[in-house]
Image (cartoon, rainbow, N blue to C red):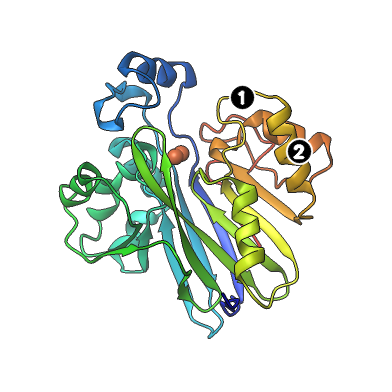
Amino acid sequence: MSKVDIGRARSLSIKCLSEISWHDNARMRQDVREAGGLGVDQFDVKWTPENAAGVSSLIESVDGGGRPRKFLMDVGWDVGYMDGIFRREGVDRMLAAGEIDFLYITHEHVDHLWGLPAAVKHRPDVKILLPSGFSEKSRGVIRESGHTGKVMELGPGAPHILFPGCASVTFDIPIFLKTHGEQALYFHVEGRGMVTVTGCCHNGVLGLLEYAQETFDGFSEFHGVYGGLHISPFEEWGPDQEEVLDKLQAFRLQRLACNHCTGVLTVQKMLERGMPVVRGSGKHGSKSELYLGNGDSVVF
Ligand SMILES: [Fe+2]
Ligand SMILES: [Fe+2]
């Protein structure tokens, strides 16, 4: 396959609206265990309602043609929690004013999708982009959210260029809790290099970067990553995680703005290695100021 040039984005900035899926890890693991473990359907787990939070980011870019672009990546879980987040960050007003071009849903996990009503109530006809492979029940979440706009399903295979400098790739993979498929973003930022943007990265950060090497043309450097990297979501560490960091380090990224399921322990190990982690403020419920958390922004 010949390589793809996705063009250039003139700028890219990302605000982490919320990167915490739930408040208490132990509670969440107990809910999953009681339902039968990670192989069960997420719709069959009796989730503890007061434990739910959610993951969502605001992405702003000026594309290669000079046009400003603004969209949400994921919409969180608990609708009440997400209402508060969207209000705090002014996203409610942006949606109502039609300033948000689309909602980009990385995958169908509960903590990334079920907060949809909190977003669509401000703009029912906003376009939704999701990866192909959603279950019928997840489609039901969208249907019942009050959404009236277009739903675009992006399939695996060739990358989808969303606008000059930004591509979306669907990874056709099974994921735990009986879900399927995850899409990730690649930005080629003028004067910087390639930046990957992910929700959970269940396909693995190394595969994500290798995909770019094999597929995209015209870039010489990896500049950064943003989002969940799924290295140690439950703060466990061993040779496998060390190996991921060994290989990740070899990509010589300039900025690691990782959060969510990356794991605090992972971030500490990255810092011990001198890797360029983008720090945060530790506010609004994020666990540490060592990484980019709730309400923090990064400019790539
Ligand atoms: Fe997640
Ligand atoms: Fe996930």
Q: Position of residue 63 (x, y in %)?
A: 53, 78
- Residue pictured at 65% horizontal, 49% vertical: 206
Q: Position of residue 296 (x, y in %)?
A: 58, 47
- Residue pictured at 20% horizontal, 46% vertical: 136
157 relative position to 64: left or right? left
| Residue at the spot of label 2 | 270
**Number of marks in the rendered image:** 2
Q: Position of residue 239 (x, y in %)?
A: 73, 28
In this orientation, which residue lies closer to the viewer: 13 or 233?
233
**Quadrant of residue 79 within the rendered picture:** top left
In this orientation, which residue lies closer to the viewer: 163 or 54?
163
Look at the image and tell me in which quarter the N terminus lies: bottom right
In this orientation, which residue lies closer to the viewer: 177 or 291?
177
Q: Is mark 2 within 8 Å of ligand 1?
A: no
**Pointer 2 or 1: first along the chain:** 1
Q: Secondary structure at mark 1?
A: loop
Q: Report if residue 297 is visible in the image.
A: no
Name the kind of residue labelled 1 in the image. Glu
- Residue pictured at 58% horizontal, 45% vertical: 204
- Residue pictured at 29% horizontal, 49% vertical: 134
- Residue 296 marker: none
Q: Position of residue 106 (x, y in %)?
A: 42, 52
Crowding near the residue tagged with mark 2, few <14, some 14–19, many ≥20 C-alpha atoms within 10 Å: some
**Distance between the Cα atoms at labels 2 and 1?**
14 Å
Q: Report if residue 225 is visible in the image.
A: yes
Name the kind of residue labelled 2 in the image. Met
In this orientation, which residue lies closer to the viewer: 42 or 113?
42
- Residue 235 marker: 1
Seen in the picture, residue 79 relative to 65 is either above or below; the reply is above
